[in-house]
Amino acid sequence: MLGRLLLCRLPRRGSPLPCWLHLPQNEIRERVSHIVQEIERETAERHRRNGSRPLGRKAVQQVHPHDAPESPKRDPRPAVHAATREVREALKQAYRLFAEAVRAAAQDLRGGRQNAEFPPGSFPPGLPYVPPTPAPT
């Protein structure tokens, strides 16, 4: 009963993706429709392959939004999300170098060197933020 009391319809407003701003409305609608159809096709194929079925409206409505899964994934999460393993490793290495530079500068600062150079993007202890330098255009 409570669910029906809280049910209301709101207008859906959206903006086209920035890369689609130059397209006419009907072309945007066609592209969105194509994407939705592709998602539906892939989902139906996955269900056929796995022998599974969608939960359905009733089952979805019976799940409390704050409930946690009964058996959550235990896989370790990646330190950084990237498209490929090579990019992930490069980002991790760049972060290691950044952290090493911050530690070295902090040690210099603790040693009394007031002009210790902190890398761009860091928060030196007790000093103002060091903004990144803009990339050359």
Image: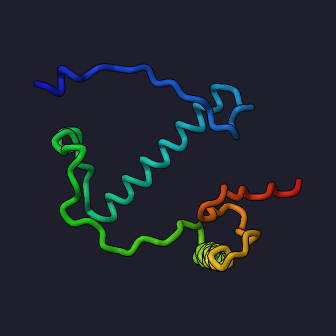
Q: Is residue 135 left or right of residue 52?
A: right
Q: Pick the quarter of the image with the N terminus.
A: top left
Occupied quadrant, residue 105: bottom right
Task: Describe residue 76's horizontal placement relative to residue 132 as left or right.
Answer: left
Q: Residue at x 18, y 20 (%)?
A: 5
What residue is rendered at 23% in x and 39% in y? 57
In the displayed structure image, the side of residue 124 where residue 46 appears, left or right: left
Q: Quadrant of residue 61?
A: top left
Q: Position of residue 127 (x, y in %)?
A: 65, 59
* Figure colour scheme: rainbow
Q: Going by the picture, which residue comes out furthest to the right? A: 137
Q: Nearer the viewer, residue 111 or 4?
A: 111
Q: How many marks?
A: 0
Q: Measured from the top left, where is residue 25 in percent x and y?
A: 64, 25
At x 89% / y 53%, what residue is drawn?
137
In the depicted view, which residue is nearer to us: 108 or 85? Answer: 108
Residue 62: image x %, image y %? 16, 42
